[in-house]
Image (cartoon, rainbow, N blue to C red):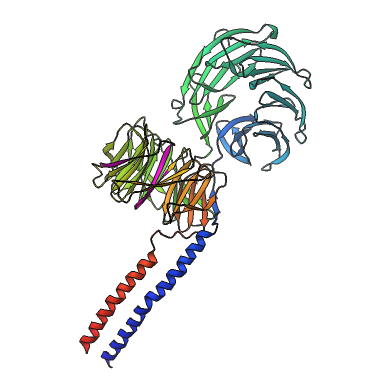
Amino acid sequence: MNLKRITKKGAYLILTILSLTPIYLAINSFVMSTSSENLVSQTEKLVEIGQYDDNYGSFLGLDFEEDIMVIASMEGIIILNKSLPDSLSFHREIKGNVKEVKIQNESIFGLNSSMLMSYNISKENETELLDNYLFQGYLGNLQLWKGFAFVVDGGNLSILNISDPKNMQSITNFSIPDNNIADYAVDGERLYILDSAGQMRVVDISNITKPTESEIYQDVESKFYQIRINNNYAYLLDNSNKFVVLNISNISNITQLSESGIEDWVERIFVENNFAYILSDTSLSIINVTDATSLQNITKLSAIELGISYSWFSCLGVAGNYIYLTDINRGVFIIDISTINVPQLVSEFSNGGIARQVCLQEDYLYLADGDAGLEVFDITNRSHPQKISQYQSPNIRYCNSIIVEDGYGYILDYYGHVEILSITDGDEITSIGNYHQPFVEYYDFTLYSQYLIIAAESTGIVILDISSKTNPREVETIFDGNCYYSLAIDGKNLYTISAGGIPKMKVHDFSNPANPQLITEYLLPNNTYWRYITVNEDRACITSSYDNILLFLDISSPNNPQYIGEYRDETLVSINTVQFVGGYLCTGGSTGINIFDIKDITAPQKITHYYDGGVTFGMELKDNYFYIADGYDNLEILETSIKFYFQFNWNAIIILLSILGTIGISTAVYIIIRKRR
């Protein structure tokens, strides 16, 4: 064999291939750039392909009849089984926004802002819409009495005949000129109405078609806004938080019997038998009203004393030895009052958390789900994500964010707590370390090498050394009296947004995390509430929580940031998350997701907007799929046709490198051939 000749042929073949490579790449670059331009010029779409929703929305009110409890929520009517009074179970759901709900004779009546709807639930697992009645104004406060429904519309009280739920009929209206209705109660043949002036009006409804006002009661020192009737007594709350008892046995001579001061602003009152239950957003008080002339405070318990770490109570009902408290964000709490002076929390029905943030690791998705803690999903099939695990801890009151990396998870609790987890096989979770700052709110955090960096409300930037996962320790705090909302790190520089006085973007040299050094402060325009920041090499984007603004800065010189410009868009409402992705910027907030082409950052171009009624709190992009933490729908997965090209013209760089490589290799091959000759 002639090795010399083969070598020469091979060399010529290599030279030919290398010489053609730049031409091929140039053609490819042209095709790719043309494709990119076409892409941007089109209106791109995000398509939902999967969802997991166990969030029943904010619980606003409740009612029950025998073994059925109905809940009014922002997601619809939730029907629960309460055959075991100390343990509620989900039965079914009627979708749609509802603010009030009542149940009577196996018919459910739901009220939204403009309509009263009736449903039949007598059939197992089947709900039938029977009728709906449309009003003209903005509705509130639904009550049922015998075969009638009473609905408040501003200063007007509408009365409907609902004896046939399939055919609800308006009977009459009762109006208060130049006044609104704050609250009312029905008792026998009388209506007791509180108007916006704080007066109690007594209305005779013995002839339901012709309500007649018979008496007005006013206390010059009180302005009443809530009322309940029990036997011959009216129980009222006034605007100075007094609980007042009136004798109404003789409506022509209504007299006050007693009063008691209430410390907290009251959401609801409920009177049953000899006790009044007074609910604030964070506490429950019980008063013995057996002797209406001498009220006895039995107990007052905060939510924490009841064993509820965080609360926003909205409504209550009493049945037998149990109180049912609805919490706007968390669901229903069941309190045992068999020993009236020692109420005990016995059970909870969760309405699902408020999804805050997502983190992806291979085929697992970790969802920070507010009050519901940490949830783990298998996303092998993106169209049908499967919830496979849930982690809750007494330390975590509100799971605000999650980072998962190298077999460890880091939970940021809104109430000043960090929990470190060991995670094996995706969903086997064990707590191994904790860090806590009392009376502090944590807003944002990030992981940098062996450090966690936390943006806090009243303690500034907290830096934790987590090299020992079981014993995280604080190594430094950046505190200047300001509140820090968000942070981002790029290379060795830390960027933070602070408020409290003049809003600023601060840049710290973070090459030594135990001793970060302030490089510069950039004063932000003092015309809005700046909240979130994201950085990418030489660019920063800062968003406003209240106004529709994106602010762009040039940070190529970190010690001297330069203003690039602002971008406004009506769909940029209450932005909760923002990310650079190649030559694009993605935002999520109260009006969904936006994607902007920022190849020319001085003139961003919106190329798509997606909104389905939810609130985007967190998102992550992988393989052209958006994984969304939706405050209402929990988890959504969206597919996009957008190819997220990077800002740099990588094709041009590759061409340049290939040309240089061609020259170098050709030279080397030529030298080898010359030597072999």
Which residues are drawn in magenta?
518-542
Name the one closer to the observer, 468 or 481.
Answer: 481
Q: In the rendered view of the protein, which quadrant contains the N terminus?
A: bottom left
What residue appears at the point 47 percent right and 48 percent down from the top-left corner?
587
Taking the image as shown, residue 48 lies to the left or right of residue 405, namely right
Q: Residue furthest left?
A: 675
Residue 407, compared with residue 371, is above or below; it is below
Residue 187 placed where, x, y %? 69, 18
Q: In the rendered view of the protein, which quadrant contains the C terminus?
A: bottom left
What residue appears at the point 23 percent right and 82 percent down from the top-left corner?
671
Residue 121 placed where, x, y %? 69, 38
Query: Which image quarter: residue 318?
Result: top right
Taking the image as shown, residue 314 lies to the left or right of residue 216, namely left
Name the one closer to the observer, 394 or 635.
Answer: 635
Residue 641 visible in this rendered orientation of the protein: no
What residue appears at the point 55 percent right and 26 percent down from the top-left corner?
323
> What type of secondary structure mainly makes up the magenta span?
strand
Residue 41 visible in this rendered orientation of the protein: yes
